[in-house]
Image (cartoon, helix red, strand yellow):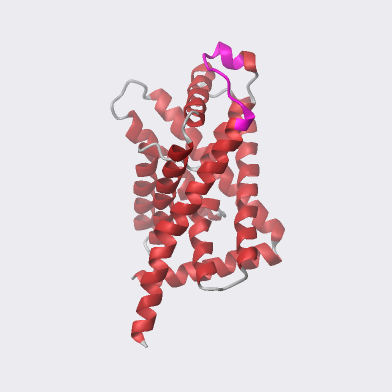
Amino acid sequence: MSQIHYQNQLKASAAKTRNFTQRRLAFSISAALAGFYIGLGFLFNQYIKLQMAGSAAAGLVSAVCFSIGLLLVIFAGADLFTGMVMTLSFGMMSRQDKQLKLVAVAAWAWLFNFVGSALLAVIFRFTKVGGAALDAQILHTVSAKLSLSIPEMISRGILCNVFVCLAVWVVSGLSSEGNKSFMSVALVAAFVALSFEHVVANMTIFTYAALFSKLERINLGVGPISLVAGLKSLFWVTVGNILGGWLFVALPYQIINTQKEKNAI
């Protein structure tokens, strides 16, 4: 079964590189959609958490709600940086293409994930959904994320993308839509409930927080939220997400599957 997943990931890596090279506009839009979808999941997560405030089940239920983001990426089709880290790592280790090109593909996806995330944040700001209570909750969530130490950002980023990439890995070998959905929801809900860090999800709420003036943040009971702190967080969480997808998922399965091939000869 592992060999099926592996071959599917090699095909996916080649397809993403080809789309980046030959269909740049389509690839850019697909990456922007991924940022938009993941952002929708995170905003839904925050809204449900607010509605269930005080309930013992609030954390788990809202974590499950977040999974709508990855479900949209998988079933609607979009190019998400975090899952792509694993996919392109297989292509890189198998020498499918030049390493710099594969890095460029990932970097482009990250950039346009941000474009889609930021667009969603701007649109959501005008909706006034959840009112001041939801605004305050999201801003406090951002403030808590920015207060993490660098080791916390990296380690939470690593473990987050272990869950995300395992979801992509497992789904790539399944044929049943129900099984794909169950595994995606379970693995995403796990990393959200554990408060791990997903850089693309953070892009949405960091942009949302940046749309509030200093006075608005003070009125909502939130302290300073600086641009420098936000960029620092995105950088270190990205480092963690890369390490999680490459070192703890792609590399082990690359060794497992290439070793099987050698033994079969």
Q: Position of residue 104 (x, y in %)?
A: 65, 59
Q: Position of residue 109 (x, y in %)?
A: 61, 53
Extreme-left residue of the structure: 56
Residue 221 is a magenta residue: yes
Whether 174 is drawn above or below 42: the answer is: below
Q: Position of residue 44 (x, y in %)?
A: 47, 34
Image point (39%, 70%), residue name: 255
Q: Is residue 124 visible?
A: no
Q: Judge from the rendering whether residue 134 lies leftward or rightward of residue 226; answer left or right.
A: left
Extreme-top residue of the structure: 219
Whether 10 is drawn above or below 103: the answer is: below
Image point (41%, 40%), residue name: 196
Residue 105 is a magenta residue: no
Image point (54%, 17%), residue name: 223
Extreme-bottom residue of the structure: 265
Image point (48%, 38%), residue name: 150
Question: What segment carries the magenta color?
Answer: 216-228
Nearer to us in this view, 5 or 130: 5
Whether 204 is drawn above or below 169: the answer is: above
